[in-house]
């Protein structure tokens, strides 16, 4: 029958997962530590296991000498001959050490060393094993709960399932089977952190349900989630004969339904990844039907999606969830507008012209700074002279424009060419029955009627006219009163 030592060794090997060599090395180190404490050195000590680990013994190597100086390392010739026939000077004998020679303190040291070493080995072994499995799916059983955090029985180790990594859709009962992702592995314990909210969890479930994803026929570009509510998966394939979205959804949706059931009813959008950001953004806003996508600023990754009125709420989603996930999936800031809202936006001139092309009409250009390819210095010089509108520019003569500082003749010629190319100047036609412009001009006024009367300011005696309300010099308020000419004559006669 196997001894207790053999049973303990087998238990460590098969139940704790510790290799045979490590177990034997640990026991050996513990016995050598006890030997060293007893004799002061372990250089001459040897540990050997007998049979199938039924026993273990410590042997001390001692050199045969004529005169004994160190009883730990040496043995006299007479003593050696008593142990071994034919012993000679200089031979080395391996002498068994009686365990009764060790006192209680030395035995306790050996036990403590063994336990500590085995704990460290077990911890390192488990850490290495589960670290290699990080990012994989594992199945355990609900063991206990504390503060919303669940401790899961994984067999040889306990998993930690924090509340923040639990889906808000899901509830768990003691003893219930839990399938989760190994999200983190720390050496302290080791601690195995589980998650059902990581995007990688959906990735692994997708690999289990869709063989084309597992064998890389279909690649997953990115997965974004609002755990418990909605997940968006962007997929693509390098093979033209493979429909990545159709393969993930499966015949009659059987594959995607299996994933939805695993996620307790969480909504999943599987869409095709496109290199063109416009098409990718359009796909990312599914299930909404997007009419067109316009890139506002490519450098800053801002875009505008135009949808019909009926699709606005679908594209945005409840509390902005759908567009928020689309932003994260595409790594673009996406604004969703209806066509009516879009037309009311105050976009830059180039954005407005480009956006108008989405609807097949042209935006009217009225300002000089809306024209493409103009020198900003020329536009600034004209604006400084009060010329910002194209109409104002066309109304000025060549001499007036050249008199403006910073305006050159060749620049004006280039500007006129740009206007001719981008602006349609429409001259209003005069109708047949319309009144001629000459007839609308006021009749000529005689020179003497035009001359204004002048007066003196009562305070500063500056020259003032009846049309003034304040003196231009001292600022006093003015009021002019006129008397009837006949009444004035009567007053003078009287």
Image (cartoon, rainbow, N blue to C red):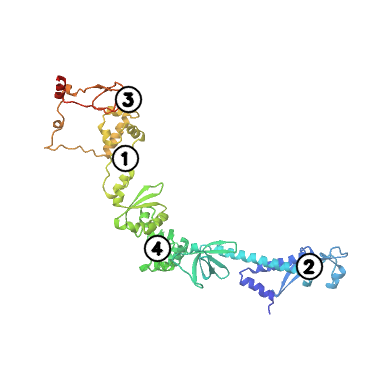
> Does dot 2 land on a helix, a strand or a loop?
strand
CB contact under 8 Å: marks 4 and 3: no
Q: Distance of mark 1 from mark 2, alpha carbons?
A: 99 Å
To which residue does mark 1 refer? 370
- With 70 as the anchor, is 135 left or right in this view? left
Compare marks 4 and 2 and give the one earlier in the sequence.
2
Is 426 drawn above or below residue 137 in the view shown? above
Q: Nearer the viewer, residue 365 or 30?
A: 365
Residue at coordinates 47% horizontally, 62% vertically from top-left? Answer: 197
Q: Tag 3: Cα neighbours inside 10 Å, few (<14), some, or many (≥20)?
A: few
Label 3 – label 1 distance at C-alpha: 46 Å
SS state under label 4: strand
Q: CA distance from mark 4 to mark 2?
A: 71 Å
Q: Residues within 10 Å of mark 1 (few under 14, many from 20)?
A: some
Q: Name the residue that disc number 4 marks.
A: 268
Using the image as rendered, state which of residue 279 and residue 113 is in the foreground.
Answer: 113
Which circle, 1 or 2, is nearer the viewer?
1
Relative to residue 91, is residue 161 drawn left or right? Answer: left
Q: Nearer the viewer, mark 4 or mark 3?
A: 3
Q: Which label was assigned to residue 452?
A: none
Q: Quadrant of residue 127?
A: bottom right
Q: Determine which residue is flagged by label 2.
A: 60
Determine which quarter of the picture holds residue 385: top left
Q: Which residue is mark 3?
A: 474
């Amino acid at each position: 029958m196997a001894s207790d030592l053999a049973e303990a060794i087998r238990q460590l090997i098969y139940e704790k997962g510790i290799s045979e060599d490590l177990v034997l090395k640990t026991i050996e180190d513990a016995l050598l530590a006890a030997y060293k404490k007893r004799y002061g050195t372990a250089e001459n000590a040897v540990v050997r296991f007998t049979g199938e680990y039924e026993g273990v013994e410590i042997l001390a190597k001692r050199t045969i000498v004529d005169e004994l100086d160190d009883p730990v390392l040496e043995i006299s010739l007479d003593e050696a001959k008593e142990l071994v026939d034919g012993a000679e000077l200089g031979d080395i004998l391996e002498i068994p050490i009686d365990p009764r020679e060790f006192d209680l303190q030395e035995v306790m040291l050996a036990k403590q060393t063994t336990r500590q070493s085995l704990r460290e080995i077990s911890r390192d072994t488990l850490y290495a094993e589960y670290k290699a499995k990080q990012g994989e799916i594992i199945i355990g059983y609900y063991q206990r709960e504390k503060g919303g955090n669940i401790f899961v029985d994984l067999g040889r180790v306990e998993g930690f399932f924090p509340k923040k990594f639990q889906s808000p859709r899901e509830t768990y009962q003691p003893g219930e089977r839990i399938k989760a992702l190994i999200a983190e592995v720390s050496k302290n314990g080791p601690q195995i952190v589980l998650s059902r909210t990581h995007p990688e969890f959906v990735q692994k479930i997708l690999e289990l349900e869709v063989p084309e994803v597992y064998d890389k026929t279909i690649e997953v570009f990115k997965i974004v989630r609002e755990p418990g509510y909605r997940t968006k998966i962007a997929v693509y394939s390098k093979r033209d004969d493979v429909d990545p979205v159709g393969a993930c959804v499966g015949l009659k949706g059987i594959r995607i339904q299996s994933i939805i059931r695993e996620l307790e009813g969480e909504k999943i959008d599987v869409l095709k990844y496109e290199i063109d950001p416009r098409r990718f953004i359009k796909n990312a806003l599914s299930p909404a039907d997007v009419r067109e996508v316009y890139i506002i600023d490519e450098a800053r990754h801002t875009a505008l999606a135009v949808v019909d009125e009926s699709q606005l709420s679908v594209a945005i989603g409840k509390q902005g969830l759908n567009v928020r996930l689309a932003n994260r999936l595409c790594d673009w800031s996406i604004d969703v507008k209806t066509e009516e809202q879009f037309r009311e936006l105050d976009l830059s001139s180039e954005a407005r012209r480009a956006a108008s092309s989405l609807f097949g009409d042209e935006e009217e250009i009225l300002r000089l700074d809306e024209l493409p390819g103009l020198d900003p210095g020329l536009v600034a010089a004209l604006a400084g002279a009060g010329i910002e509108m194209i109409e104002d520019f066309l109304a000025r003569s060549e001499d007036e424009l050249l008199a403006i500082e910073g305006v050159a003749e060749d620049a004006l010629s280039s500007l006129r060419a740009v206007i001719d190319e981008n602006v349609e100047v429409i001259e209003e036609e005069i109708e047949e029955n319309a009144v001629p412009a000459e007839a609308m001009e006021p009749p000529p006024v005689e020179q003497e009627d035009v001359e204004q009367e002048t007066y003196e300011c009562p305070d500063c005696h500056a020259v003032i006219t009846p049309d003034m309300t304040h003196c231009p010099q001292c600022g006093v308020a003015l009021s002019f009163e006129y008397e009837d000419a006949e009444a004035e004559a009567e007053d003078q006669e009287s």
